[in-house]
Amino acid sequence: MIFKNPNGATPIDDNEISGLIPDITLQSELNVWEQENISDAYLYYESRNYTTENILQISFLLELHKSMFDKVWKWAGQIRLSGKNIGVDTLQIYPNTKDLCDNVKFWIQNKTFPVEEICVRFHHRLVQIHLFSNGNGRHSRYATDLLAKSLGLPLFTWGHSDLSQEGKIRNTYISALHNADKGNFHQLLKFVKT
């Protein structure tokens, strides 16, 4: 199977491909399997209320990814073992994620930033760390939505589009993430509400 990665997507190596559960050969089939798995996870998580403290735990973030991709990938919910075109070194994933969760708790307690900006900064850093071999954008957007919900915010709209598909809206999103890499969160704050 050969994957066609949209702009900014993380390539999957041969070892990771061997963790594919369904017997599929086409990218379109993979997309359907992943979307159905994600939809099931949404139903599960939407029927429950999680506190901010619950969400800002590494174990919760790993379990969320597992729920979103466990019917597609054997390694769902496991921290990646390979280097990627984005993300911290594999040995830094756990400590960086713990630091992120602790920082977000601090920001919330001390009102360091407006609540929407805290959520956007959380999302951006999760993407930067890149915990998993695949599904990082979808995972980080949903984890951010759950965080926003726990803080009493409405869910973000994320451009009202499937951001896993190539196109203008995805390119705007990737551009906003790159601006946030430089410390400018304005475009990403605007994007999440469009």
Image (spheres, grey):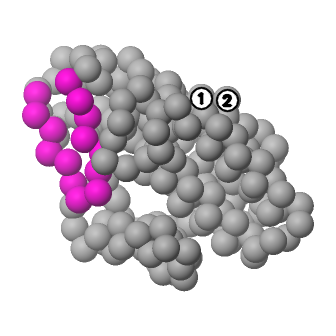
Label 1: how many residues lie within 10 Å, few (<14), some (14-19) or many (20+)? some
Question: Most prominent secondary structure in the magenta stretch?
Answer: loop
Task: Give the vertical position of 81 relative to 186 (above or below).
Answer: above
The reply to whether residue 34 is in sight is yes
Residue pointed to by mark 2: 59
Choose top left, top right, bottom left or bottom right for residue 167.
bottom left
The amino acid at mark 1 is: Glu
Position of 146 with respect to 79 (left or right) is: right
Q: Are marks 1 and 2 in contact (CB under 8 Å)?
A: yes
Q: How many marks?
A: 2
Residue 89 among those drawn in magenta: no
Task: Label 1: state its secondary structure.
Answer: helix
Task: Label 2: state its secondary structure.
Answer: helix
**Residue 139: image x %, image y %?**
49, 45
- Residue at 74%, 56% (x, y): give it: 104
**Residue 144: image x %, image y %?**
60, 55
How far separated are the C-alphas under marks 1 and 2?
6 Å
The reply to whether residue 48 is in sight is no
- Residue at 61%, 34% (x, y): give it: 94
Front of the two marks 1 and 2: 2
Label 2: how many residues lie within 10 Å, few (<14), some (14-19) or many (20+)? few
Position of 125 with respect to 151 (left or right) is: left
- Residue at 62%, 64% (x, y): give it: 121
Task: Give the vertical position of 24 relative to 142 (above or below).
Answer: above
Residue placed farthest to the right in the image?
A: 110
Residue 3 among those drawn in magenta: yes
Task: Give the vertical position of 99 relative to 120 (above or below).
Answer: above
Residue pointed to by mark 1: 63
Choose top left, top right, bottom left or bottom right for residue 49.
top right
Most foreground residue, 112 or 167: 112
Specify the segment rendered in magenta.
1-14
